[in-house]
Structure formats: C-alpha cells, structure tokens
Amino acid sequence: MAKPARSPTADAPPPAVERSRSAVGSGLRSLASAASGFLDRWSVVGTGVSRLEKALGDQFPEGEHYFGLENFGNTCYCNSVLQALYFCIPFREQLLEYYAKDRNPGDAEENLLTCLAELFAQISLSKKKTGVISPKRFVHRVRKQNESFRSYMHQDAHEFLNFLLNEIVDILEKEFSMMKDSPETTSPEGASNGDINHLANGVGKEPLVTWVHKDFQGILTNETKCLMCETITAKDETFLDLSIDIEQNSSLTSCLKNFFSTETLNAEDKFFCDKCCSLQEAQKRMKIKKAPQILVIHLKRFKFVEQLSRHKKLSYRVVYPMELKLSSTSNDVDCEYSLFAVVVHLGSGPNQGHYVSQIKSCDHWLSFDDDNVEKIQESTLQTFYGSSHEYAGNTDHGYILFYERIVKS
C-alpha cells in the first residue's frame, strides 16, 4: 500500500535516551533572532491555563511545549506523523539547528523543509506551554508538492512519512550540490550535518548522508546460501523504516523474528548460483548490519485481498513492548530500543478512519488527536494492540511505532 522509503544505496554515536527524551533548551536562543520575522505568519489559538497544564502541574517539563495541530478536513494523517517527528528529539534538534544556521525566512525560497522548520521553531519558541497551531503553510506545500495528498479522501500516514523524509533528503542533497559548486564552500556540514557515505554501492557516485539518514537509516544484509556449494552471496540494502507482516495474537518480537527467519528457496523459486552456474536450492535470510538510531516499524495492517479486489484492514492483536531488543544484528550484539511514539489508525478499513499519536515526553505519555492534547497513562497503549478476534468492536490499532536506541554508558 505504501511505497518503500528511498535512501542511499548503501547505508556520532546516538545520544543517550535520557538526554534525548529531556526537554530541548539548547539552541533556542540562537533561534530567537532567526524566528522573529515569521511568527506572525502562523496562527496560534488558546488562552489561559489549559487542562493539560493543570493535569501536569509542577511536573510540566521545563522548556517543553505541547501543541495540537488544526485539521483541514482530512489532515490527521499529516498531524499524527508531525507530532511523532517533533518528539523525535534528534530530528527536532537538527531541524531547528538547520533553520537557525542556514535559513533566512525573508530571503529563502519556500519548500517543504523550510515550512517544516518554521512550524517546529514556532512550537519551540512559543511563550505558551500549550495551545493549537494551524500548519496551513506546511499542508499547502505538501499538497502542492504531491498530488496524491490534494484530495480530501483518507490518506495513509506511512506513505506520508516516507514522502516527507525522502523530500527532505532531496532538498538537502540539492542544497549540498549547490554549496559544493560554490567556491566559498569547503564543507558539507551546512546542508547535510554529515559526511559522504563510503560504503560500496556498485555505483561510482557516493551518496550523501544527511542528518535524516543519520537518524533513521539502517542497513540490512540479504544473505543467500547455496545448499550445493555452500557459497554465501550477500547484498546490502538500506532502510528508513521496516515494514513488518503481522499475525493474529502475536507480538512485535515474534513478527520481527519471522522477518529475519531463514527461508528455503526450492522448486520454482530456486536460486541461480554463480559458482555452480545453475539453479540450486538455497537458504535466504535478512540480517541487520547497521541498526538505526531511530527504529521506525510499520505494521502492515492493510492487506490486498484478491477475492475482494481491494485492501482490507487486519485488526490482529500485536503486542509491542516499551523496551525492544533487536537481536538479529550481524555482529550478534543486541540493540536495545525504547518506545516513544505510536501512530494509531482508528477505523475499520484503509479508506476511512482517523489517525492519532501517542507520545512519550519526559516520562509522560500524551495523546495528540489533532487540536486536542491530553495526558494518558502508559497502560492506555495496550488498548491499541489490536483485537484477539476479527470482528471485534475495537478498531483502534497501532500502525507505526517509533523506537529510540538506548546507548549504555
């Protein structure tokens, strides 16, 4: 249903979770001067002390802001993803740094990245702790850039996430290309916040590693072992998220285990072995060569049913843990992750429904439902695991999971 994310053909140690989950205070002073000219270009709604402020009381994180986003008819798919990305702290910090250092709101040509940077900066610099923001400019730019999102039909949040990240990568690559052609530029830091990727990719051109790649990109190794000569053929491929098949009454750990399980190729699916120079039975499996800092997992809840000639939503119950171990790495070292955001699809089918986000911020779980933001208990996430039988009344299911890698000191 959703097209796969595009990333370079070959894929600073991430900060500790304790740091990244804390409120962002550094860098905001430098943003103040850059942002002063654009605040009047957005509308902020809300007066007085909100219910959320009262609910959090003196536990309201210093320097943090919790803003709802106005819905323009069908833009819940956009709002839910934006909230998850805003509370992806490394991504937020790098986007704000990019805006403060490299953009002049008065002179810059508007694009999707500048609109997103302005939106994030407005939230971060707001004098209010809570409220509602109208991301009208950003939504207008999304619809202008991609005709798929121009209609007022129900859209897919995963497809939007892929589109947004890939579009940001394209913009950063173009800016780096322009900077490289400038005689005054000697470093790609301004555009990419990273270096050139030196992994072999079979192409003469080395891809640029942007900060989007540094946050989200991992590397999978596809290994195929010929059962005749036992030669192993390995091919690397990058990913910005993992799309995982799901099963009824299972767990995310179980689904990942199936994703990385060994598959036998035989009969009509035999593998052509270059060493044997013939079709042979083989074993195939995927391994993680490089784990990403932010692990995004897309649960494939929409399945195409040939008999119906349409997609059907799978309401399967899939339990996802707060702490996740990814044990299928090539060096056999477990990578530990902590859940910080869940994009939830509410509805019985792929062409109808609603999206909300459940976000962890500074040890608090919050529900972001367009313009409404509420504090929730961690146990509330269990209601989005799915249904133990197909025709249950519960249609609220976790769809996209965001995990941040835990780095042990």
Image: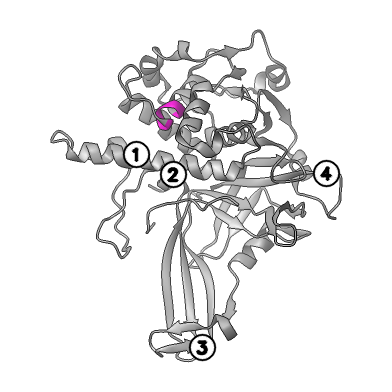
Q: CA distance from mark 4 to mark 3?
A: 46 Å
Q: Give the residue type that dot 2 points to.
A: Asn
The quadrant where residue 244 appears:
bottom right
- Find residue 394 and name its label: 4
**Residue 99 left/right relative to 123:** left
**Residue 118 left/right relative to 391:** left
The quadrant where residue 72 appears:
top right
Identify residue for label 3. 227
Q: Is residue 113 magenta?
A: yes
Pick the residue in front: 268 or 94: 268
Q: Is residue 193 visible?
A: no
Instruction: Name which of mark 3 and mark 1 comes first in the sequence.
Output: 1
Q: Position of residue 163 (x, y in %)?
A: 49, 42
Q: Is residue 12 magenta?
A: no
Residue appearing at x 27%, y 40% in the figure: 176
Q: Give the residue type that dot 4 points to.
A: Asn
Q: Are marks 4 and 3 in contact (CB under 8 Å)?
A: no
Q: Secondary structure at mark 2?
A: helix
- Find residue 172 and name its label: 1
Give the crowd class for mark 2: few <14, some 14-19, many >=20 residues within 10 Å: some
Q: Give the residue type that dot 1 points to.
A: Leu
**Residue 10 left/right relative to 66:** left
Give the crowd class for mark 3: few <14, some 14-19, many >=20 residues within 10 Å: some
- Find residue 166 and name its label: 2
Q: Secondary structure at mark 4?
A: loop
Q: Are marks 2 and 3 in contact (CB under 8 Å)?
A: no
Instruction: Name which of mark 2 and mark 3 comes first in the sequence.
Output: 2
Instruction: Name which of mark 1 and mark 4 comes first in the sequence.
Output: 1
